[in-house]
Image (tube, rainbow, N blue to C red):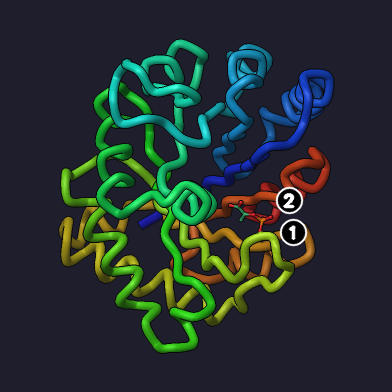
Amino acid sequence: MTRRPLVGGNWKMHLLRADAVAYCDRIRAEAGDLPADAVLFPSAPLLALVARKLGGSSIACGGQDLHPEEKGAHTGDVSGPQLVDAGCEWVLCGHSERRQNHHESDELVERKALAAQQHGLKPLVCIGETAAERESGATFDVLDRQLDAALAGRPEPFALAYEPVWAIGTGATATPEIAQEAHAHIRETLADLTGAEAASTKRILYGGSVNPENAAELFAQPDLDGFLVGGASLDPERFLAIIRSCG
Ligand code: PEP
């Protein structure tokens, strides 16, 4: 089963409009010649601008989060229809920084993934264990719990990102062996939950201190289908180099 690689760039709370314009001009110039699907996840005030700058290219735009409800009194939140209106195709659900800093539960992540799907967005659901969970031998239990919850409402289609919390923004990238072991486990659990065929087509991205130097070795792992990149996605040349390592 061939899965076209997918690489996401999570800008988090970085970059201003002028940076985003220069970035999009640069990356757009290379868009016709990339070996992977690519999607940028800017923060909310930049979404419409980035989506417009990337419009008509093979590079998509996505939100970093959405509220599960369509509209309402939710100060500071962004809805699925608003993301679609801004030109988004994708949305991150359950990034560890949302789970940790905003106390998002597995159940809320599932509601967000389902809402995304209902509004025509592709949810990229993030799962991953903390350092303490890995040290206590609970990694697979945590992944199963998060996956089970994310799929409870059967959100589909979507991609998954395995992002060990201890590797995000720390420089402590998972070894290719650790990443492959987790990805293989996730695919097995997916097969139990959704059937072998669906599991074999699902793209599972790795995230956690990916950079142009370590990407190719990680990408060589059979169950790893691309990356979700934070810090290294802020520089278009480094982001392009990571995308090219999936060729
Ligand atoms: C992320 O934010 O999803 C991420 C993986 O960040 P970094 O690449 O900086 O570790």
Residue 137 position (above or below residue 231) = below
Beta carbon at label 1 within 8 Å of ligand 1: yes
Q: Is the CB of mark 2 within 8 Å of ligand 1?
A: yes
Residue 236 is situated, as x and y percent measured from the top left of the image, at 79, 38
What amino acid is at disc 2?
Gly
Where residue 196 sits in the image (x, y, percent)?
A: 20, 62
Q: Nearer the viewer, residue 17 or 225?
A: 17
**Image height of 63 relative to 50, above or below:** below
What residue sits 28% from the left and 30% below the top?
A: 115
Q: Quadrant of ligand 1?
A: bottom right
Q: Amino acid at mark 1?
A: Asn
Looking at the image, is mark 2 or mark 1 nearer the viewer?
2
Which circle's residue, 2 or 1, is located before the other in the chain?
Answer: 1
What number is the disc on residue 231? Answer: 2
Q: CA distance from mark 2 to mark 1?
A: 8 Å
180 relative to 229 in the view: left or right: left
Q: Secondary structure at mark 2?
A: helix
Q: Nearer the viewer, residue 242 or 67?
A: 67
Please give the label number shown on residue 139: none
In the foreground, 56 or 155: 155
Circle 1 is placed at which residue position? 211
Using the rendered image of the protein, determine whether residue 3 is visible from the camera's viewpoint. no
For mark 2, does the 10 Å Cα neighbourhood hold few (<14), some (14 to 19), or many (20 or more) residues? many
190 vs 198, nearest the viewer: 190
Judge the density around disc 1: few (<14), some (14-19), many (≥20) Cα neighbours within 10 Å: many
In this rendering, position of residue 1 left or right of residue 153: right
Residue at horizontal 69%, vertical 60%? 169
- State which quarter of the image contains the N terminus: bottom left
Q: Residue at x 27, y 66 (%)?
A: 145
Q: Contact (CB < 8 A) between labels 2 and 1?
A: yes
Point out the residue furthest to the bottom here: 136
